[in-house]
Amino acid sequence: MPTRRYRLTASTSSTSAAIDSFAVARPGTIRQISFHMHFNSITDGASVQMQVSKSAVADFSVGAGTLTPALAEFYQYGNFVTSGLDQVAGNFVVDCNDKVNVGDVLYLNVVIAGTVAILTDVLLVVEEGGS
């Protein structure tokens, strides 16, 4: 079956719901989500949480009251004990089996703690076919 790649990108220094999004062009199944992220911080204990979700609101809770469960999440944490600049980079690949339909909108939500600047790129691989 043919595959289609979708890309979500962001460069920010603040918490952002729905910082990037796209509408699915053809029905299919998400087979893989790859997170690639770099951040720098001048704050000890800085962190970045990212999620790909069908919800435009960041929701990292689990259980009752959860909005729409995220398709995938990625966390990075920086910790240093002296002053200076902390640089953290990471890649994370998630294998998936999540159905999507034409017009479904997928969002990249970001939650930041501390003084952080991030640059991120998220690639989704969708096997087209079915509904």
Image: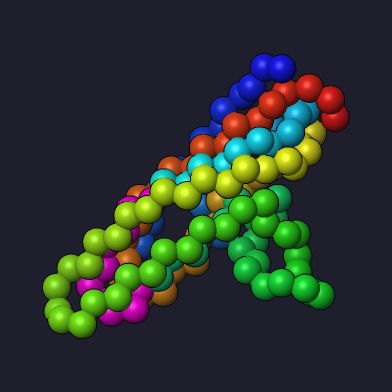
Horizontal arrangement in the rendering, residue 129 relative to residue 37 (left or right): right
Res. 59 visible in picture: yes
Task: Tell me where residue 19 appears, x and y as whole percent.
Answer: 51, 52
Task: Tell me where residue 103 appears, x and y as whole percent.
Answer: 75, 34
Res. 103 visible in picture: no
Q: Is residue 6 magenta?
A: no
Q: Which residues are magenta?
A: 37-46
Quick one: which residue is furthest to the right in this view?
A: 131
Q: Quadrant of the C terminus?
A: top right
Task: Tell me where residue 80 appears, x and y as whole percent.
Answer: 24, 77
Find residue 126 and report its image quarter: top right
Looking at the image, residue 66 lies above or below residue 35: below
Task: Tell me where residue 14 appears, x and y as whole percent.
Answer: 41, 65
Q: Nearer the viewer, residue 84 or 97?
A: 97
Horizontal arrangement in the rendering, residue 82 relative to residue 50 (left or right): left
Q: Residue at 78% of width from left, 28% of height from top?
A: 27
Q: Residue at 62% of width from left, 43% of height from top?
A: 95
Q: Residue at 67% of width from left, 73% of height from top?
A: 61
Find residue 62 and report its image quarter: bottom right
